[in-house]
Image (spheres, grey):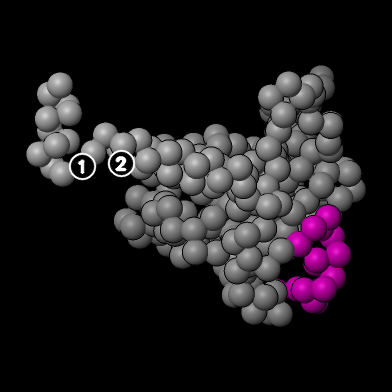
Amino acid sequence: MFAQRTLYRLGISHNSCSFARFRWSTSSSRHLSSWPPHGTRFFNAHASVSYMPTRSRRVVVGITGATGIIYAIRILQILKELGIETHLVISKWAHATLQYETPLDAAKIVELATKTYGHRDVSAPPASGSFQHDGMIIVPCSMKTLAAVRCGIGEDLITRAADVSLKEDRKLVLVVRETPLNEIHLDNMLVLRRAGAVIFPPVPAFYTQPKSLDDVINQSVGRMLDSMGIFTDIFPRWEGFERSKK
């Protein structure tokens, strides 16, 4: 009775409310009947579920404009030889730097990778957490890229993929290349280390008694791959001080 009196005072009849309910139900049914939108796929709740097919190991490689592109080239060569799938992103300034540091042009470097993406293509697979991979390495990693990753600024594919690697708790190795380091550089490294990234300055070891520049590069690259759980025999490993036999 109270509801009827209220409707009467508002000048709304019970029949009109019923008609409104009818109109709402028919219109909503009409809209719901067209859901989902054309082209949208929904999984059947009763469909069987299976594991994703097995895949080969997969590594994302980012190359930025800092000096040291030879490290990236050697890593790509080794991973290709090992049969590990590589997804490569080369920044704009890396294209400029490689002209000064290697006789190889960008086309030859791209041939070493399984797949390559433009650095501005933030719609590429590595930009999404659903894209499964076994780790990312930025080699060399410029201080600009380091700062962008620290601040979560995914303005290009390299920084976005690095941000995704951190949020998905995947391996991220940053081969930082700068010297000397100021307080801002060090603070950025500390924050990213605490976030789970591996900070890897390419510092050579001399206990291996390198005979050439290739030996120095191989030792550093081998240790970088160690940080990603990829263990190779491209450099001699420390086994303690060798003492002459008596």
Question: What's the distance in space between the residues labelled 1 and 2, CA to CA?
Answer: 7 Å
Q: Which image quadrant for residue 41?
A: top right
Please tell me whether mark 2 sits on a helix, a strand or a loop. Answer: helix
> Which residue matches tag 1?
12
> Which range of residues does the magenta coloring cover?
101-116
Q: Which residue is label 2 attached to?
A: 16
Does any portion of residue 198 appear in the rendered image? Answer: no
Asked whether, in this view, residue 48 is left or right of residue 10, the answer is: right
Residue 148 rendering spot, x and y as whole percentages: 44, 59
Task: Give the crowd class for mark 2: few <14, some 14-19, many >=20 residues within 10 Å.
Answer: few
> In which quarter of the view is residue 104 placed?
bottom right
Residue 145 in the image: state x and y as whole percent.
50, 61
Examine the rendered structure and indicate whether residue 22 appears above or below residue 218.
above
- Quarter of the figure with the C terminus: top right
Q: Position of residue 77 (x, y in %)?
A: 84, 55
For this rendering, which residue is in front, 18 or 78? 18
Q: Residue at x 23, y 38 (%)?
A: 13
Residue 112 is inside the magenta segment: yes
Q: Is residue 15 visible?
A: yes
